[in-house]
Amino acid sequence: MPMDDFPRIKKDDLVADFPGVFDTGRYFDVGSGWLGLIREFVTTALPYDPTLVVHEVKEKFGCMRIWWDTDVLEARLAKAKAEMKSAYTCEVCGADGYVRRPPPERMAWWRCLCDEHASEDQRSWPRHPPGRMTGMMQTRGGQWYRYDRDLDRMIPSDPPEGWSR
């Protein structure tokens, strides 16, 4: 499915739902399937950081990326959780999906799609296995957290295997 052929999240919808959070944002370009992840992130983060302002929401390497500023740990964990869940959520419909990576000889976007919304060609692409850093974040204080799909939350963790400063 070409990138322009599916519904996209509109900045105006986010501004209406969360006044002050997205008002000054510059760039929003992800599929409607990730709207639930964005809503969960904001409703979780706002009680911890009422000054929350999101600058950009976009896709990179098949996953959602959120650009913002905060030092509040709980809000940072909510952001990390939303980004990490996007690697398992179809960008088109929000169902379970997989990051599909084109073969090395192909020039194409990585996409997180369910089988229904992946083209026949994309269904033939390998499902991108999570890397050693996927699902993990490190705080400024050095503590590591990882996303646990079964618990659906970020939990304290040891550094990734082979990690060194």
Image (cartoon, rainbow, N blue to C red):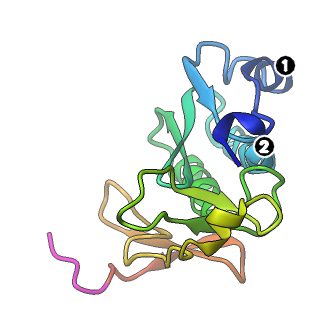
Q: Quadrant of residue 151?
A: bottom right
In the displayed structure image, the side of residue 123 where residue 101 appears, left or right: left
Outermost residue, top side: 24
Q: Quadrant of residue 66?
A: top right
Residue 94 to residue 16: above or below: below
Question: What kind of residue is marked 1?
Answer: Ala
98 or 16: nearer the viewer: 98
Q: Secondary structure at mark 2?
A: helix
Mark 1 and mark 2 in contact? Answer it, CB < 8 Å: no
Q: Residue under circle 1? A: 16
Q: Secondary structure at mark 1?
A: helix
Residue 136 to residue 79: above or below: below
Can residue 82 be seen by looking at this rendering? yes
Q: Residue under circle 2? A: 35
Identify which residue is drawn at 78% across, 49% down.
Answer: 92
Q: Main secondary structure of the magenta part?
A: loop
Q: CA distance from mark 1 to mark 2?
A: 14 Å
154 or 109: nearer the viewer: 109
Question: What kind of residue is marked 2?
Answer: Leu
